[in-house]
Image: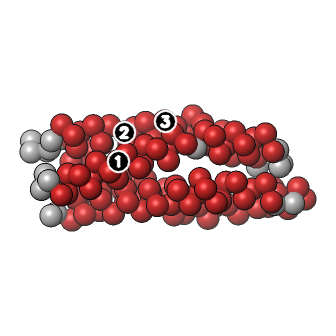
Amino acid sequence: MSSIVLAHIFSTFFLTGLIWIVQLVHYPGFHYVEPNDFVAFEKFHTNRISAIVIPLMFCELLTGAYLFFLPSVTQLMKISIILIALIWLSTFILSVPIHGKLALGKDADLINKLVTTNWPRTILWSIRSGLLIFLIFKGKI
């Protein structure tokens, strides 16, 4: 397995695990932050999570783009890679704007919306991980 394939698999698996923690623990935990502390907490969260997520999302995107155009890539792998675009769209159309609003102050309705609108990313990354596991066991990557 090439280092590009390994980087792709690692970034996807890592992001899948991370998104489940964010979905089930971290975002719902926003409700427990005191209103007076929330703006500082949101800034802390955004800075720290971005330092982890941005490099991994770019790694997944760039390695996926490279793999997509290989002559030997399977249709299933291409579908998996196309899901990356949907994850990015969901991130920048749904999640980022909500975080921008939460940066102004705590809002329980926005926190609930953040949790709800994060499900597409959680599901898409889970599907990607499942597809990669399937392809690994079938010897297709």
Residue tagged by mark 1?
128
User: Foreground residue, 77 or 133?
Assistant: 133
Whole-percent x, y for residue 52 in the image: 51, 63
Q: Secondary structure at mark 3?
A: helix
**Which corner quadrant holds the C terminus?**
bottom left
Could you tell me which residue is drawn at 72 percent across and 43 percent down?
A: 112
The numbered mark, 1 or 3, whose residue comes first in the sequence reads 3
User: Could you tell me the amino acid type at mark 3?
Assistant: Leu
Q: Residue furthest left?
A: 72
Q: Residue under label 3, please give it.
A: 89
In front of the other: 49 or 127: 127
Q: With respect to residue 84, does 140 lie above or below? A: below
Q: Which mark is residue 65?
A: none
83 left or right of 70 in image: right
Q: Residue 69 in the image: x percent, y percent?
A: 18, 41
Q: Quadrant of the N terminus?
A: bottom left
Using a 10 Å C-alpha cutoff, classify the residue at mark 2 as few (fewer than 14 neighbours), some (14 to 19) or many (20 or more).
Answer: some
**Amino acid at dot 2:** Leu
Q: Which residue is mark 2?
A: 83
Mark in the foreground, 1 or 3: 1
Residue 62 visible (yes or no): no
In whole angstroms, how far apart are the C-alphas of marks 2 and 1?
7 Å
Q: Nearer the viewer, mark 3 or mark 2?
A: 2
Which element type, helix, strand or loop, lies under badge 2?
helix
Where residue 26 appears, as percent x and y from the top left, is: 65, 59
User: 10 Å neighbourhood of mark 1: few (<14), some, or many (≥20)?
Assistant: many
Above or below, 28 relative to 123? below
